[in-house]
Amino acid sequence: MGEGWRWRSAGGALLRVAVVWAVSTLTLLALAGILPDFRLRSDNSESITWTAVTAAWGAGAFGLLSALVWPLVVRAFLLVPALVLGLLVFFLNGSLLLLALRLIPDGSGAAAPETAVVVAAVMSAVASATSTALAVRDDNAYRRRLSRLATRRRRRGGRPADGDAPPATVFLQLDGVGHTVLVQAVKDGLMPTVAGWLEDSHRLTRWHTDWSSQTGASQLGILHGSNHDVPAFRWYEKDSGRIMVSSRPASAVELQRRAVLRTGDAGLLSLDGASRGNLFTGGAEQLALVLSAAARRGRANRSRAGYFAYFSDPANAVRTAVSFVAEVGREIGQSVRSRVRGDRPRTRRGGLYPFIRAFATVVERDVVVAAVMGDMLAGRTAVYADLVAYDEVAHHSGPHSRDAAQVLKRIDRAVALIAKVAEHAPRTYRIVLLSDHGQSPGETFEDAYGLTLKDLVRAGCGLPVSRRAGRTRSGAEARDAARHALLGALHRPVGEDEAEERPSPGPEPIVLASGNLGLISFPDLPGRLSREEIDGRHPALLRTLAGHPGIGFLLVRSERHGSVVLGRDGDATVELPLAGLDGSGPLAVFGPGAADAVRRTDAFPHAADIMVNSMYDPDTGRVHAFEAQIGSHGGLGGEQSHAFLLSPLELTEPVPGGGEPVGAEQVHTVLKRWLDESRCRGEPFGPQVPLRRVESPAYPGGRDEALPVVGSDLPDGRD
């Protein structure tokens, strides 16, 4: 019976090859009839039979070359920047077709180079679709393929066989998906996979973010155990004269260095881990689309290696390209419909934004999901991946919009795919879903009041205000990710764009925005200015800010009372010492824990001279972002401060007794405990990543400090 099953299996595989070959042949014939610069016969060969044979030769040669040559070609181009590799896919695919046509006997095929690119793309897509359709109902074939791949990778990595390894863990971060949004999406049927887990196998826990409710602070705390001295998404540091931006590679490297130095630990993923699509490595050896590794050039940068697993199949590249174009069209259509309906609030969505959205929702998603599946088939112990699609769309369409709801559906399908692969992995996998923050809706500060925070600050300082206010830069992570992919494509070192991060010291204030959190610094005076110094220099500034209806409260240092909170309490403007504040006064509306979050940030060495949080309406959940976002995060107020953890029931409760974690550092402690629970033996499975003293690539002139050593992925001294 076993012998008969093997023969039937082999017969089924041959049948699928034959069908794919036949469909590819027919596709080639159709394209030859449609495209004027593509032919499959020589001038003296008019026979229909010979043309069909020529098409079969061409289809077979192209299929064979794609299977044998393509993976080698992609591996050779691994050091090419990611965006360039995506563009080269079409050129390489077309080159393989031209080569296949040359292999046809009697030189019976020819195509213009530009036509070859089109034909090759169509051929790859059709072959992939046919092969997938044939295998949809063949679960045995699917399992065998996954099993063979897992066995090969396991042997290559010297890993234990089935049953020999303790359970492993995959952490999937759904960027920007707040607790309320997840609950509502499950209720509305948008996320059936998550709904099934909640019914059978997982528990849902809410956790409270820090005052800086954004990916830089949250993910640094989650992966490295410390987000000390990260007051916002972007902030000015007087001692270095640098504007730190969480989504810039050089800043990410420095933030990671500081966290490792503070904790003495390489990170959550330092034991046989993989980091995919994140801002920070977490101490992982295996990296793909990791921002803090993007500042390293050459072979030492293994962050792009994850592209090989995806682009080694030309059909993957074609599907991603088609999906990319479709997503651009979808965004343009949704933007037009939003304008026609007169949706409010609404923000500008033109320019490059449709392409940035497509990069976040298609390219990053496809590569990250493929990398995670590869990690699971390879049996890695800890994987942390960030899916940024919802966060990017919600910034511009709103966290409760129909556009964002459609993204949640696609995220759920990606989660389901990863869960399916877990069934065929060489070891048991526990999948944990979590988010780094939520998003709060509301029209921008500029749309609500007709001026930006910078305009208001300049007016309070008695400085001229431009009649034509410049647009405040958005803090969305995907924008900088796409930007740095483009810099890499142009072979421009990512450090070369940092002149704009070092403003010239002068009397004018530096005003920065991080969602609904604003930071005001006076660069010409050292240290953190006191309220008395600010009043002496600009008597109307603090009064102007604290009394504005769009601002919830200010944090400033006082020489007499220590740090104080300024804001409106009813119709009056009040000043309350922070030390004894219990959440009353201007902070009362922000809920329990607000005072503690503000006190923690107040202790940061690089807290701004004036920290500004926008108003928050608890009845509507609205805040006012100080940048061009109608769904924002970064400060206190509403859903942005409430993230979630969705964990398997076999893991212990995040907080014993059913409490809620507070702050990203506590979430790190929870995740680390779960990893320890999964390691059943005394010695953890997989190599541990040590620490080593190296120079920070972000600050070549700085001291040698401890940095995580990730195999050969070490800083080489270049940004």
Image (cartoon, helix red, strand yellow):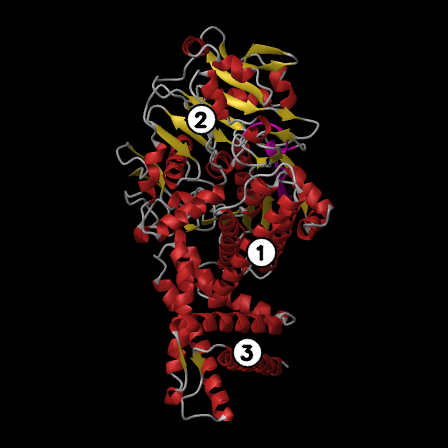
Element marked by disc 2: loop
Q: Is residue 518 above or below residue 89?
A: above
N-terminal-most mark, 1 or 3: 3
Taking the magenta stretch, the answer to whether it contains residue 615 is no
**What residue does disc 1 label?**
418
Q: Nearer the viewer, mark 1 or mark 3?
A: 3
Give the structural element (helix, strand or loop) at label 1.
helix
Foreground residue, 279 or 381?
Answer: 279
Q: Residue at x 58, y 59 (%)?
A: 421
Q: Amino acid at mark 2?
A: Ser
- CA–CA distance between discs 2 and 1? 51 Å
Residue closer to the observer: 49 or 672 = 49
Query: On the image, numbered disc 3 is attached to which residue?
Result: 20
Residue 375 shown left or right of residue 583 in the figure: left
Number of numbered discs overlaid on the protein picture: 3
Q: Magenta residues, as a range?
A: 635-656
Identified by mark 3, the residue type is Val
Measuring from the top left, give residue 626's x and y in whole percent: 52, 30
The residue at the point 43 percent across, 12 percent down is: 538
Quadrant of image for the N terminus: bottom right
Q: Is residue 529 visible?
A: yes
Disc 3 element: helix
Image quadrant containing the C terminus: top left
- Using the numbered discs, state the Cα–Cα distance from disc 1 to disc 3 in whole angstroms: 27 Å
Q: Which mark is residue 15?
A: none
Residue at mark 2 = 466
- Ranked by sequence position, the earlier of labels 2 and 1 is 1
